[in-house]
Image: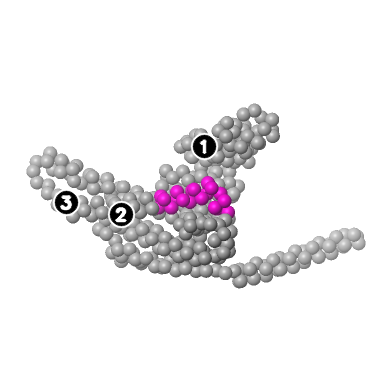
């Protein structure tokens, strides 16, 4: 009986101790946040819409432009920080890496049918950003991925500008007259209307690609911050806008892996492997996901394929299990 009371008292003391530790931890975290150096940059961009622009296209361009201004400003600030200086990075490299770390927050946006005004900000703890930049710069595959993402954004902007100029020029030059026979009318429509419609479709696709890149970078930044659910949702938006972008599938699969949602991770890895069956990296990671849900035979098959393609981790695992590959 006494022993039972002693156990009960011990449990109570343990409960109080946990509460006390929790309070101390909370105070520590709160103080850390309170004294963290949070730097905020705010910019506004006003986009003058052309005759071929819509609200959607105007917003996409305005958002990309304001984000560039903010990232450049943050890059200039970080360039002066001692830690960043030690990394021996150019300003462009800093800007590229921070695009995958920080998120742009929209403060206000207005559209009157002709002008799209967008105000946004970036708030970041320079010390935390420096740590993330250090981790990313050491990972060459991630650095390359972010560099390619910024190149995609640059190419999308150039394509948008090119198509916009061509569409505006054609619109100004063409005064379609549907006189003559039916055959002549059809011929005029084919020669004058169809090419314009094709270019307009290309313009819309370029706008979607630009928006997809924005969602990709949001997802990447969320993943770096450990918000994997948010990352998966952002990559899903990127895929909806550009279903052909394999990088979004790969990163969503990684987010699903981190959420222990292996079934969905396998689906995304499979999409990527259909496009590139000899990707040893993806084969290995799909093998891991398959293994985690008990589909061991399929996992071993992926490990073997990855090992034959040179994946060292797959080779090490198979060798440790005495499995020939």
Question: In terms of secondary structure, where does tag 2 sit?
Answer: helix
Of mark 1 and mark 3, the one earlier in the sequence is 3
The part of the chain drawn in magenta is 135-153
Q: Name the residue beneath numbered marker 3.
A: 174
Q: Main secondary structure of the magenta part?
A: helix
Distance (Cα) linking label 1 and label 3? 49 Å
Query: For the residues carrying marks 2 and 3, which lies nearer the camera in this image?
Result: 2
> In the image, which disc is placed on residue 161?
2
Magenta stretch encompasses residue 218: no
Reading the image, the residue beneath label 1 is 279
Residue 148: where, in percent of width, then height? 45, 49
Task: Give residue 83's quadrant in the image.
Answer: bottom right
Mark 2 and mark 3 lie on one chain; the one further toward the N terminus is: 2
Circle 2 Cα neighbour tier, 10 Å, few/some/many (<14 / 14–19 / ≥20)? some
The location of residue 159, given as percent across then percent down, is 33, 50
Instruction: Describe residue 57's horizontal placement relative to residue 2 as left or right.
Output: left
Circles 1, 3 touching at the beta carbon (< 8 Å): no
Give the alpha-carbon distance from disc 2 to disc 1, as whole Å: 35 Å
| Label 1: how many Cα within 10 Å (few below 14, some 14–19, many 20+) | some
Quadrant into which the C terminus falls: top right
Whether residue 87 is visible, yes or no, is yes
- Rounded to the nearest angstrom, the CA distance separating label 2 from label 3 is 20 Å
Q: Quick one: 291 or 203, which is closer to the camera? A: 203
| Image coords of residue 1 (percent x, y) | 91, 60
Q: Is residue 127 left or right of residue 161?
A: right
Whether residue 290 is visible to the viewer of this picture, yes or no, is no
Q: Residue at x 18, y 46 (%)?
A: 192
């Amino acid at each position: 009986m006494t022993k039972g009371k002693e156990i009960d008292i011990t449990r109570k003391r343990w409960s109080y101790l946990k509460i006390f530790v929790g309070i101390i931890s909370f105070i520590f975290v709160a103080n850390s946040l309170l004294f963290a150096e949070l730097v905020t940059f705010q910019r506004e961009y006003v986009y003058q819409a052309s005759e071929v622009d819509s609200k959607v296209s105007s917003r996409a361009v305005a958002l990309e432009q304001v984000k560039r201004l903010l990232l450049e400003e943050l890059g200039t600030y970080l360039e002066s920080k001692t830690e960043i200086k030690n990394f021996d990075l150019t300003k462009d490299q800093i800007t590229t890496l921070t695009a995958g770390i920080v998120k742009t927050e929209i403060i206000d946006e207005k559209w009157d049918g002709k002008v799209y005004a967008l105000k946004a900000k970036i708030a970041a703890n320079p010390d935390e950003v420096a740590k993330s930049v250090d981790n990313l710069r050491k990972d060459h595959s991630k650095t390359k991925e972010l560099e390619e993402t910024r190149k995609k954004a640059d190419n999308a902007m150039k394509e948008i500008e090119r198509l916009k100029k061509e569409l505006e020029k054609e619109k100004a030059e063409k005064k379609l007259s549907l006189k003559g026979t039916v055959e002549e009318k059809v011929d005029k429509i084919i020669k004058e209307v169809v090419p314009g419609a094709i270019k307009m479709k290309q313009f819309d696709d370029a706008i979607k690609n630009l928006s997809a890149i924005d969602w990709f970078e949001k997802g990447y930044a969320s993943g770096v911050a450990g918000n994997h659910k948010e990352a998966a949702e952002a990559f899903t938006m990127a895929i909806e806008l550009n279903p052909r972008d394999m990088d979004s599938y790969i990163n969503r699969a990684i987010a699903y892996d981190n959420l222990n949602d292996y079934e969905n991770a396998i689906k995304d890895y499979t999409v990527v492997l259909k496009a590139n069956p000899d990707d040893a990296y993806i084969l290995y990671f799909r093998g891991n996901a398959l293994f985690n849900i008990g589909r061991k035979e399929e996992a071993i098959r992926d490990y073997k394929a990855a090992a034959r393609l040179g994946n060292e981790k797959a080779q090490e695992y198979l060798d440790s299990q005495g499995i020939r590959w």
